Image (cartoon, rainbow, N blue to C red):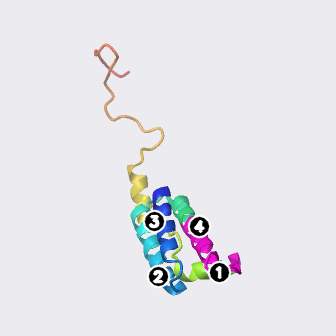
């Protein structure tokens, strides 16, 4: 994630003086692609963190465009809500599939006869 954020920071710096809608469209593509690649049922917090870091980088870049520095978090929140997608949890079907592959606690081995450390077969009692 750090490598991707460094790339986003460098590209935002290059695109600093483009209009905000152009920057928003580009950032939407970046964040959507990141979410599409890394979205698994247990990765929601990391996706939200990535969105937050991209938001912070975008805000810092926009504040550097003038000496007024009037880009508040309220204005930035509205901008981000308009342009960046929310970190969506994958569907419940994917979560159900994950649960079906997870072994249950207290499950028994179907093969009751097992080997001890010396390799001899023991019969279950």
Q: Earlier in the sequence, mark 1 or mark 3?
A: 1
What's the CA distance linking mark 1 and mark 4? 23 Å
In the image as oriented, which residue stretches furthest toward the front? 67
Q: Mark 1 packing: few (<14 Cα in 10 Å), some, or many (20+)?
A: few
What's the CA distance linking mark 2 and mark 4? 17 Å
In this view, the residue in front, 11 or 50, is 11
Query: How far across and down, in percent of the image, does residue 67 sit?
Result: 69, 79
Q: Earlier in the sequence, mark 1 or mark 2?
A: 2
What's the CA distance linking mark 1 and mark 2? 22 Å
Residue 52 is tagged as 4
Residue placed under numbered mark 1 in the picture: 66
Query: How far across and down, in percent of the image, does residue 58 sit?
Result: 57, 73
Q: Quadrant of residue 40?
A: bottom left
Residue placed under numbered mark 2 in the picture: 25
Q: Could you tell me which residue is drawn at 38 percent across and 21 percent down?
A: 125
Q: Could you tell me which residue is drawn at 51 percent across and 63 percent down?
A: 47
Query: How far across and down, in percent of the image, does residue 22 sit?
Result: 48, 84
SS of the residue under disc 3: helix
Q: Main secondary structure of the magenta part?
A: helix
| Chain part drawn in magenta | 51-74
SS of the residue under disc 4: helix
SS of the residue under disc 2: helix
Mark 1 touches mark 4? (CB < 8 Å):
no
Q: Could you tell me which residue is drawn at 54 percent across and 84 percent down?
A: 20
Q: Earlier in the sequence, mark 3 or mark 2?
A: 2
What's the CA distance linking mark 3 and mark 2? 29 Å
What's the CA distance linking mark 1 and mark 3? 46 Å
Residue placed under numbered mark 3 in the picture: 92
């Amino acid at each position: 994630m750090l490598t991707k954020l460094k790339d986003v920071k460098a590209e935002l710096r290059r695109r600093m003086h483009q209009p905000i809608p152009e920057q928003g469209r580009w950032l939407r593509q970046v964040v959507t692609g990141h979410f599409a690649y890394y979205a698994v049922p247990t990765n929601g917090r990391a996706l939200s963190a990535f969105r937050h870091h991209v938001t912070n980088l975008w805000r810092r870049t926009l504040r550097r465009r003038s000496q007024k520095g009037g880009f508040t978090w309220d204005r930035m929140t509205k901008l981000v809500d308009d342009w960046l997608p929310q970190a969506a949890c994958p569907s419940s079907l994917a979560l159900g599939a994950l649960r079906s592959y997870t072994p249950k606690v207290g499950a028994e081995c179907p093969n009751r006869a097992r080997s001890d450390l010396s390799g001899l077969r023991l019969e279950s009692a």
